[in-house]
Every structure is written in structure tokens, then in C-alpha cells.
Amino acid sequence: MIGWLKHRFSQLPLGLAARFTLFVATIMLVLAAAFVVLTNNEVERAAQESFEDQASHLLALVGSVAQNLPDEQRFVDLQKVLDNVAGLNDATRYAFVSTLDAHGRLLNADPETVASEPESKLALDEAVIGRTPALEQGGGMIHIAVPVLHDQKPVAVARVGVATADLDDRIAQAASRNLLLALTFIGFAMPFTAVCMTYITSPVRKLIQATRRVSEGDYTVNLDEERQDELGELARSFAAMARNLRDSSEAVERLTYTDGASGLANREQLRLHIDAQIADSRQVALLYLDVDRLKRVNEALGIEVGDNAIAAIAERLQVTCREELDQFRRDQNGGDVEILLARLGGDEFGILLSGEVDEDTASHVAARVLRGFAVPFEVGDHSLSVSASIGIAVSPDDGIDLSTLLRTAGSGLGEAKAGVVNSFKFARRDVNSRAYRRLVIEQELRQALERKEFEVFYQPQVALHDGAMVGAEALVRWRHPQRGLVGPTDFIDIAEEVGLLDAIGGFVIDDVCRQCGIWADIGLFPKIAINVSVSQCQQPDFAANVLKAIEKAGVPPGMLEIEITETVAMLDPRATARELSPLRAAGVRLAIDDFGTGYSNLASLTRLQFDILKIDRSFVSECVRDGSARVVVATILTMAHNLGFEVVAEGVESAAQREFLVSQKCEYGQGYLFGKPMPAADFEAQFAEHRRADARDLLGQIRRTATRKGRPAA
């Protein structure tokens, strides 16, 4: 029970002072209640004893009078005595003599007020039967009965009734007085306890507040460290801990956001500052500065001199930029411009202008900085002359993050370094449009993955001999929110350069499996070919991921074909076969794409466990008008058939090309002659219609055959 109370008390949402005050209040209430109860019991007991003593004296007096009176005057004189007793005691409610016959029965009736009291009857019976004085209490009265004896026989009973109202009043008054004393004590003690506890716990509260400030990064501690008790020791220990945390935090911040050699901001701090300025809708201009001959200083005079030179350059940049900023504010009457200097690494520095900046502002700062490089730098015993070049990028046209701004400014820096010494150039998109466009696409590609802007289109593949649609090749498209549908030639190379191609390829595999699962559920089973990139195919878990996607979507593995380029297949044929063997074992078909453009040899082809060869479109497009192309296509087909490969011709765009391929027994083809890449819903509709048409043709053939043989058609 005590443990439960202790646990509950510790869970109260109260402070230490409030808990202790509540605890003291509880103890005081318990003690006050005990005091009131014990005192009231004592008063009641004392009053009861006093009243009983008075009743006993009255009993003795009545008995003495009753026994000593003469016989002839006994009843009359006894009644007079009782009347006198009643007159002397205001609490007496009745006093009379009841006479008895020889058999001990009353000869006169009791008054109505006495007859209704059962305790009075008890006292009377006890006195008559026991022939001794009797006393009974009840109903707010004490009933006294004293027998009057003659020849040892009761002849009468003297009866007195005394009210106990005085006793009850005395007990009630005592209880009220004790309760008032207890409440008065608590009323004075509780505020005193609260004040004392507030004073005692004040250092603890200050320590809690200091702890919260430290947790929020404010290491200023204002505690009473002069105390000589445990709280003083705790305050001193906490203050020392806060100082250590402050020193450690400052050291970590310096290492994280400051360049050690120059004392300037580093690349990370520059990135955070640009992000914050762009988030506040402030324009920024980045001056990308490269010191031209600093590497020669390191090589000739040593790294230590080179580090000192970096520190000297940083100091001059700070002075120059501060002077330029002051001049700008004077000219613009306090214009809103801020400057942040950063060392980007090696001999490269960044100067970030933010606020009310434009190309004119950036030009003034760049010119002022380059003029500062005209004066040699004094580094120890050496006087160093170095030059600098600056490329300038301005947001938002040249980018909205550090990476883009640096790349864009880098193009301007390259132009500046190719021109005169100590010059600056802006990154112009009309001069550098291709590079800028690649930067924009790179940024948008990352957002496209997050926003799920990619879609899978399907280009039909048909059986060349009869035109039956057998499947499709899955091709990715980018549904750009502004430019509309973007083809792969506009973004695949960039995605591969920046490492996003694997993520896009993974999306295609998952989406194709999902779509094939839907088609399988409605009874459609087209064969879908999926291109995979070099890096994607070389991932150690590539096959496992494909099988996982197939299992998750519930796709029959035979619906899928995985295509890798001839170049990838020939890099290491045995390793390629080993890595892809789990897919082929599960029923997934494998194809060599763009065959004829790589460096295949017959020995390698015989080791590759593939099912399909896809002739590159460059040969198919020329196979009608170019004799050499016809020979290459025919040779590939003959070789593939002899090795057991199926062949798919890519880029079939004319009936003449189809006829040539059919004459060479090419099984399948794809190209604009049969259909352009289309959304999944359109391909599904066309494939379903081809299935129905094929079924109608088959039924017609069966009927015609049956008719020729003289049997009725079904």
C-alpha cells in the first residue's frame, strides 16, 4: 500500500515544492483530525464521568432521604425532598414518588412524559426487583429509580429524570473549539510551509531553468555557486558542464561550418546560407573566384607558405568586401545587401551577395576584389604576386542552389581564365545554353522522381509473317509539368551522368510488373521487353530485385523479357550469364539489344544463355537501299537461327523493309510501321482487339477446312 501511494504521489504533475507542501498538508490534516477526535473523546468521557458523578450523588441523596424518613410521613416528605432537588437543578425533568402494593405493582400511574421512556421503565423494574437504586440513560435523559423499603420490602420508588442536554452542549462546544484550533493551526502552518519550500527549492528551479537553456543551445548559466551545501556543489558541477558543452559546441561548429586555413565560411555554411536566402525570396549572386598562380607558390615555397598565403588572401578579401559594402550602403542610403565569404577548397573562394543585388552590384564587387589582387601579398619574408579570375552567377536565372550556381558560375570562370588576367565574366545562357539546359534538366530530374512524373509507354512488337501483335517494348517517358511529354533522348544521358538512371530503371521494372499483373488478371499475356542500363545490370542484387518485383505483382515470369545491350553482354560474357541465370531459370527471357553495334564474336555468343537477338535499327533502316546493310542483316539472321536465337528487328518503318525481313525468315519486328510508343491503356485496347481478330481468323480457317472436307462447320 505504501509503495502504491509512493508511486502515485511521484506521478503527480506537480513541482517539488508543491509536492512537499501537499505532503505536509496531508500530514497536518491527519494530525489535526486525530487531535480533534482524541480531544473530543476525552471531553466526552470527562463530561460523562462528571454527569454520572452528579447522578450518583443525587441517587445517594434520594436513597438516604427515602430510608431515614418516618413511615407516616415518608411519602409526603420524600416528595418534598424530590421537589427541592428538582428546584435546585434546572436539568431535572421529573421527580416524584410511585407507591407499590404488596405485590410490587404501581398504585399510581406514571406521567405521560415518563411512561413513554423505555429507559424509565427499565430503571423502575431494576429498582423494584433488585431492591437497589437503579440508573438508566437514553433518549437525552438519565432516569434514576430508588426503592423505598419497609421490612425489607419495596413499598414505593423515588424516581428522578435529569436531561443530558448540558452534557451534549459541552461536548459539542469542545468539538467546535478543537476543530477551530486545528483549522487555525493549519491556516497559519500551510502558507509558512509553502514559503519555506519555495525558498528551499529556489536553487533547484534555477538549475532546471539553466538545464532547459543549455538543451536549447544557450550555455549562459546564472547559478549560486557560492553556497557551501549540496546545492552549491551541484550548481558548480553544472556550471562546469555547461562551459565544457559550450566549448565543445563552438569547436564542432567551427569544424563544421568554418574553413580551418582561412577562417572563412566553408562550402557547407555557404550552401545553408544560400538555401536560407532563397527560402526568404531574396536574390543572390555568387562570385566564383579562382586564384591563378597559388599552386606555384605551394610548389616553390612549400605548403606552410601556401597556407599563410591563403590566410592573407582571405584577410584582404574581408577588408575589400567590407569596404565595398560600406560604400554601397552609403551610395544606396543603407541598401539591403549582405556579403558572405567562403573558401570552397584549394585556391577557390566564393563571395555570396544577397538581398537587393543585381548584375551591376556583382560587377562592382568583382572589380573591387580584382583590384585588391593588384597589390602583392606580404607573407613572411616573401612578397607574392598572384592574379585571380571570377565567374558570376545570379539567381534565379542561373540556379537556386549552391551546386547549380557553382556550375553555372564555373562556365563564366572558364571564360574569364581564357581571357585577360584579373577579369570576371557572367555565366550567359545564350553562350552556354547547352550546359545550362543540362543543369536545369538535372535539377528537374531529381524532382521528377520524387513527384512520380515518369510513365511507361509500350511500342508494339508483331509477328512479321502475319502481323499478329505478340507484345511490346517498355519505354520510359517523362510527363513534364511545363514541357509536356519528354522523350528519353532528352534526359537519359543526363540521368546516367548524375547517377539517376538506376532509380529510373527500377521504377520501369516495378511499373511494368504492376501493369503485367493487371493484364494477367484479365486474361491478356503480352510479352513485354524491358531495357536495363549498364550500371543497373551490374548491381549484385539486380536479378533478385527483378524476381522480387515479379513475385510482388503476381506476374507470370514468361511475360517479361530483359534486354541488355550487346556492349554490356560482351564485357564479361560468363559473368553476365552467371548474374542473369536466376532470371532465365525462373522463366524470364533474355535478349541482346542493339546487336551489330558492338564487338561480338561467335565464341562469346555460344557462351551466352540468351533467347533473343534484336537487330539494331541502323541496319534495318538501310536494308532496302544499301546492299551492305542487307548482307549484314541476312548474316545476323542466319547466324541467330543456327544458334537457336529468336530475332526481333528494330526500327521497321516501311512495307519494303518488312518484306525483306520476312524473306530472310525474321520472326518479329517493331517500329512505326506497326505502332508508336503508346500509354498502357491504348496498348491494352489494341492488343485485346488483335487477340479477338486472331481468334476470328482462326475460327474462319477451321470452318473453311471443315467445309472442304465435307463436314459441317462448328
Image (spheres, rainbow, N blue to C red):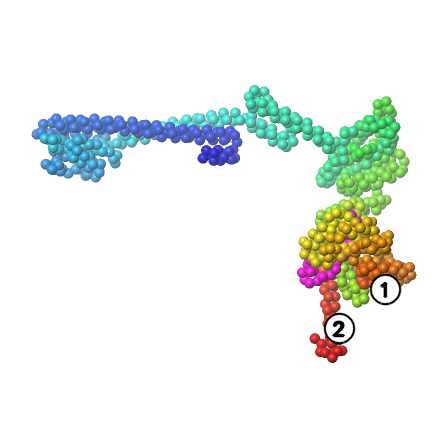
Where's residue 265, x and y in %? 76, 32
Q: Is residue 15 left or right of residue 597?
A: left
> For the residue carrying disc 1, how many other residues have a C-alpha within 10 Å: few (<14), some (14-19), or many (20+)?
some
Q: For the residue marked with disc 2, what is the amino acid?
A: Gln
Residue 701: image tag: 2
- In the image, what residue occupies the spot 72% across and 55% down? 586
Q: Quadrant of residue 463?
A: bottom right
Can you name the residue that lies furthest to the left here?
72
Where's residue 92, x and y in %? 21, 31
Q: Is residue 303 left or right of residue 38?
A: right
Tell whether position 519 is magenta.
yes
Q: Is residue 650 visible?
A: no
In the rendered structure, which segment of residues is drawn in magenta? 517-535
Residue 330: image tag: none
- In the image, what residue occupies the spot 73% across and 72% down? 699
Q: Earlier in the sequence, mark 2 or mark 1?
A: 1
Tell whether position 153 is magenta.
no
Front one among 487 and 590:
590
**Contact between labelled residues 1 and 2, with CB atoms less than 8 Å apart:** no
Q: For the residue marked with disc 1, what is the amino acid?
A: Gln
Q: Name the residue beneath numbered marker 1.
A: 664
Q: Is residue 493 above or below residue 642?
A: above
Report the Cα–Cα distance between label 2 and label 1: 26 Å
- In the image, what residue occupies the spot 30% across and 28% down? 45
Front one among 245 and 544:
544
Q: Quadrant of residue 698?
A: bottom right
Where's residue 29, x and y in %? 42, 30
